[in-house]
Image (tube, coloured by chain):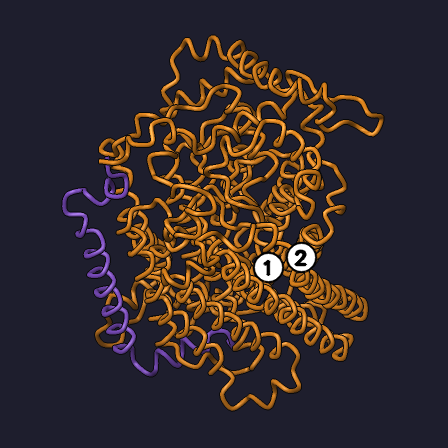
Amino acid sequence: MSAQIEQFQYDNKVVKQFAIATAFWGIIGMIAGLLAALQLVFPVLNFDLPYTSFGRVRPVHTNAVIFAFVGNGIFMGVYYSLQRLCKSRMWSDKLSKIHFWGWQLIIVFAAATLLFGYTTGKEYAELEWPIDILITLIWVVFGLNMFGTILTRRERHLYVAIWFYIATWITVAMLHIVNSVEIPVHLLKSYSWYAGVQDALVQWWYGHNAVAFFLTTPYLGLMYYFVPKAANRPVYSYKLSIIHFWALIFLYIWAGPHHLLYTSLPDWAQSLGTVFSIMLIAPSWGGMINGLLTLRGAWDRVREDVVLKFMVVAVTAYGMATFEGPMLSLKNVNAISHFTDWTIAHVHVGALGWNGFLTFGVLYWIVPKMWNTKLYSKKWANWHFWLGTLGILLYAVPMYWAGWRHYEMMNEFNPDGTLTYTFVNMLDGMKSFYMLRSLGGLIFLVGAFLMIVNLIKTAKYGSFIANEAAEAPALAKNVEIHGKEHWHRVIERRPIQLLILALVMVAIGGVLEMVPTFLIKENVPTIETVKPYTALELEGRDIYLREGCYTCHSQMVRPFRSEVARYGEYSKAGEFVYDHPFQWGSKRTGPDLAREGMKYGHEWHYNHMARPTETETKSIMPNYTWLLTTPIDKEGTPAKLRAMATIGVPYEQADIDNCVADLEKQSREIYNVLKPFDDEGKLYRNDDGESLLTEDSEIMALIAYLQRLGTDIRVKPNTTAK
Amino acid sequence: MKFINYLESITGVSIYPLSAQIIFIVVFAVAIYLAMRTSKESIKKYKNLPFE
């Protein structure tokens, strides 16, 4: 007896909202990226304002592109495809609405707080704890709505795209919660619970898997739905997609430590990251091949169909990036790419090519569908395709070149054993590459604008179907089983079991990597001379975080001849035990600062922060003049020390009680060193020729912090000898 | 004090990477086995779900 046919409607309104948000935030994120790129060529574009300086604009760019552009793109694609694959409307319109507006609210809070300097200082996880909580709540709303829809579906089998959505949901939840454990100091300030090497491991376990489970697995789900739809033929191999899914989610979670090769992370963890990264080629290319071969017999249509063009380039970019990724995990290759623009090229092939082009393809496909019309201009869409492709090439090629050049120049020695180039020599040679990169970004942005105009025109000529009528038989309560079936078939139709199995798969990697690194904390011989930061240094460190100095400066000297010769003794894990959060960085647009302490006098730092070009004529660092005039917020200092003491930094009660007096004393000492220079007119003065030197300005704290960096193990140089 | 070795010296650290490899091989083998065992009819039905 056949089941009763049920009438229902797909909710297109929420898809439309997410589509608009995707396009809008995409443009904002790209503009922020373009501004950041231009700031490296024309430092004047930092506008001498805290809110527009590179260190704050760059996190806005990365967060906007990842969580606003791609985030909304994920929800757009999931809400469209999930309903159709489940033959069911989204479970709750109210939850859809809360999800949409909640996510937009998070984005607005994120942009505002980052520009105002409220940041945790951990890359791609910069948002402060109240926003972290809001993200968790909205993510739960998304999950409830998704699982509600899955549980009330009219199709027994869960199509492979839904597995990817489920794995994405549970893994992102796990990553976000574990990496965001922090101790609040006040509403917009917190310290990471983890310190130094442990913080680095957790952060890059999170950071790498944000790429894996936010930028990749949900988009693979979209690929498995939208590429067959656009090509009008089923996926090449469903069997391959099953293997692809399990192998990918299992392997990805281990690969994080490849971001920490040659650092103070234990060797075995580095090797584990490398091995799993290499193995990742197999499932990644399995997915790419599956996507591309879906077009078998339809390649002629790629010439005509702009949606397919975007999707083919997207999947190809995915294949390129996932071949390059494992290569970058080899230690000898990583030595070149890490801290240079090679990594920037790599991530942009992924972001612009894979995420960008797949999003554009999906938008060009669903907008005419939802507005029941044809695309307004295929010609414009083709223009967009070629502009986008040219933009990616113009972006990536100069950055690859720049990365190699950076490495080569930094590793060149004179016959007498001295380094050939200074850091600024190298940086000066980067400008033309940075200019070309900006041009590539601009062209890509113009293409995106063209798409928006095209889609608005398309919508104008069509008629939006807010509720799309559909019908399907109700799901029979009892499954008719013909013959013997094995457990995986059962799992495939039981979403909760699938969720649990996916969680187990992804949790294994995290647990096995982190547990040993955490459990042996007690066994780590601390370096006797490494002491907690003084109150003033801690304030200086917070200013360093606030201004996003980590976006350009690393604090990790790798054990290479060139780095030891340039920066000093290589970094040891024991030096970072009080660093909540760690500040190893991931890109050197400026030199490493791990051994910066006492390399220069206080007056050099004072002048350098006020006008970097005064001390280094070719510097591209922004002016930080406001640090000279903004007083240190001493009222908050005791709470900061208390918070640090709570998470294990050995501050005594007396340290906390006397912290303000101690801070003022150390600040006065720095002031006293600077005063004679000021009297002689050797310190920066404002346009009216007035001295800005005061005892309690933020620059005092920053100088104290910078002068402390890397000096702890210099106190007794021989303590490490045996 | 040798700083470079202190995180490598935990007893039996090799069990972690080793277990990782073993778990992966098992997962991978099971996934292949299951995919291959699925009947052609089922596969055809599943891969056409986006078109229903």
Q: Colour of chain A?
A: orange
Give the chain of mark 1. A
Residue A699 rendering spot, x and y as whole percentages: 63, 26
Q: Is residue A67 left or right of residue A628?
A: left
A659 or A591: nearer the eye? A591
Nearest to N terminus: mark 2 or mark 1 = 2
Residue in the picture at 30% in, 26% down: A528
**Amino acid type, mark 2:** Gly
**Front-most of A258 and A11?**
A258
In the picture, the disc for residue A73 is 1
Mark 1 and mark 2 in contact (Cβ < 8 Å)? yes
* Residue A165 x/y as whole percent: 46, 59
Q: Determine which residue is flagged by label 2.
A: A26
Residue B37 visible in the picture: yes
Other residues around mark 2 within 10 Å, as few (<14) / some (14–19) / many (≥20) = many
* Residue A310 percent coordinates (x, y): 61, 75
